[in-house]
Image: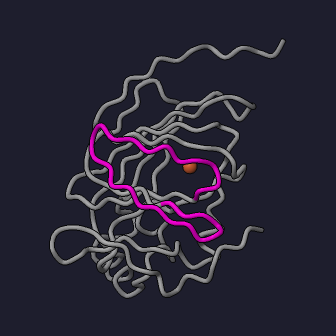
């Protein structure tokens, strides 16, 4: 018999607090080098706000990466833009790429940007009460297109892991989520994108 994990009860707040979690990480502006396409705007943000400015925070609970276990967590992505590109998480493909993930919007307004290695794309706007089922083989990134923190509850198989290098090597995802000039968002082709090549 394998060791049996103890059930965990979690209290999830619309502000992204996960009481009962066992992991937290944060990404700051200095960690986002190379993520935004407008390098001059990124450098200006760094100068103005400093490299320590918070971009997003993730709280999570898991039991370790054994087969079948779930990671449950919250992602809180602060609002903002770099040039006309909305604030994003780094995005990833799961290292075990057939692993799926659920995102459920707790507060704010965001977009889940989804792309496959073979050229398919989707972008789903999420508001509180809406969820997206991200199947395996889809690269995914959260984008905050609102004025408040975009907070989601997520869950995925812990052993999925994350491949962040795939997007970095491709000079970003194929699509950018940018301001449309009328208070909304639109997709624009990323001119720097060189195609995804899995190592
Ligand atoms: Fe993921």
Which residue in the rendered view is the most extreme toward the right?
1
* Number of numbered discs overlaid on the protein picture: 0
Could you tell me residue 109's position as x and y percent? Answer: 27, 52
x 66%, y 58%: residue: 163
Indicate whether residue 196 is drawn in magenta: no
Judge by depth and name the residue closer to the eye, 129 or 167: 129
Residue 45 lies, with reference to residue 164, above or below; the image says below
Quadrant in the rendering for residue 4: top right
Work out whether residue 44 or residue 163 is closer to the camera in this orientation and state it.
Answer: 163
For the N terminus, give its image quadrant: top right
166 versus 192 height, above or below: above
Residue 130 figure quarter: top left
Q: Is 69 located above or below residue 106 in the figure? A: above
Residue 13 located left or right of residue 139:
left
What is the quadrant of the C terminus in the image? bottom right
Q: Is residue 98 left or right of residue 11?
A: right
Q: Which residues are magenta?
A: 114-138
Between 21 and 72, the one lying in front of the other is 72
x 25%, y 48%: residue:
108
Residue 56 at what x, y percent from top left?
Answer: 40, 54
Residue 118 figure quarter = bottom right
Residue at horizontal 34 percent and vertical 62 percent from the top: 53
- Give the image location of residue 123, x and y in percent: 41, 61
For this view, does 36 lie left or right of residue 117? left
**In the image, is residue 121 part of the stretch drawn in magenta?**
yes
Residue 132, placed above or below residue 19:
below
**Rendering colour mode:** one colour
Residue at left 38%, top 23%?
11
Query: Image check: 24 left or right of 143?
Result: right
């Amino acid at each position: 018999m394998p060791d049996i994990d103890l059930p965990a009860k979690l209290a999830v707040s619309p502000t992204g607090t996960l009481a009962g979690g066992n992991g937290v990480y944060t990404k700051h502006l200095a960690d986002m080098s190379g993520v935004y396409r407008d390098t001059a705007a990124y450098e200006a943000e760094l100068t103005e706000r400093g490299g320590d400015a918070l971009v997003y925070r993730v709280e999570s609970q898991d039991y370790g990466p054994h087969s079948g276990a779930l990671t449950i967590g919250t992602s809180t992505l602060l609002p903002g833009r770099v040039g006309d590109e909305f604030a994003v998480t780094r995005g990833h493909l799961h290292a075990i790429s057939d692993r799926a993930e659920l995102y459920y919007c707790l507060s704010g307004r965001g977009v889940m940007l989804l792309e496959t290695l073979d050229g398919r794309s989707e972008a789903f706007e999420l508001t509180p009460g809406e969820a997206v089922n991200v199947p395996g083989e889809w690269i995914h990134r959260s984008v905050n297109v609102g004025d408040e923190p975009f907070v989601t509850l997520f869950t995925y198989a812990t052993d999925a892991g994350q491949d962040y290098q795939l997007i970095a090597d491709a000079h970003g995802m194929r699509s950018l989520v940018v301001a449309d000039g009328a208070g909304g968002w639109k997709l624009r082709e990323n001119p720097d994108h060189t195609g995804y090549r899995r190592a």
